[in-house]
Amino acid sequence: MATCPKCASQNIVKNGHIHNGKERFKCSDCGRQFVENPTNKLISQSTKDLIDKLLLEKIPRVRIAKVAGVSERWLQKYVKAKYESVPKQVNIQLKKGS
Ligand SMILES: [Zn+2]
């Protein structure tokens, strides 16, 4: 499901394609046009390292995205994936040798 990068509305309509064949979307609420995953540009490890550091500084993600030159959307995914990969408190109750 596409989400408007400007107002976060999900009131999105398809609005043709861009040159490389990707679908273009338009937000019905604010009129913003956008392409989901504009380019699959690879984020370098050094950028990720920088982001990791900035995340520790409790800097707003909007700013981190700007400083690192990544999209907020990408950053959100990155952070989410990061937290999911970190072993959390083990919620699964260990079976006590029953
Ligand atoms: Zn919008």
Image (cartoon, helix red, strand yellow):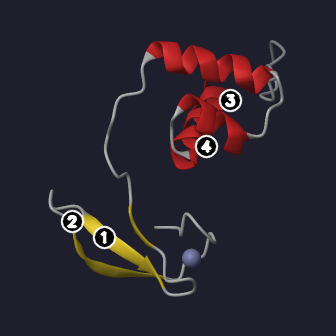
Q: Quick one: label 1 or label 3, which is nearer the N terminus?
A: 1
Mark 3: which secondary structure?
A: helix
Residue 71: % across, % down? 52, 44
Mark 4 or 1: the one toward you: 1
Q: Residue at x 80, y 19 (%)?
A: 94
The residue labelled by disc 1 is 24
Residue 28 in sight in this render: yes
- Identity of the amino acid at label 4? Gln
Alpha-carbon span between mark 2 and mark 4 = 24 Å
Q: Which mark is residue 53?
A: none
Q: Which amino acid lies under the numbered mark 2 shown in the image of this protein? A: Ile
Could you tell which of marks 4 and 1 lies nearer the N-terminus? 1
Quarter of image, ligand 1: bottom right
Q: Nearer the viewer, residue 32 or 25?
A: 32
User: Image quadrant of residue 53?
Assistant: top right
Residue located beneath label 4 in the image: 76
Using the image, determine if residue 62 lies above or below residue 54. below
> In 3D space, how far apart are the residues under numbered discs 4 and 1 (Cα atoms)?
21 Å
Comes first in the chain, label 2 or label 3:
2
Q: Which callout, 2 or 1, points at the residue further toward the start of the chain?
A: 2
Residue at numbered disc 2: 18
- Element type where label 1 sits in the image: strand
Foreground: 63 or 77?
63
Task: Write down the residue under mark 3.
Answer: 83
Give yes or no for contact between labels 2 and 1 (Cβ–Cβ under 8 Å). yes
Circle 2 SS class: loop
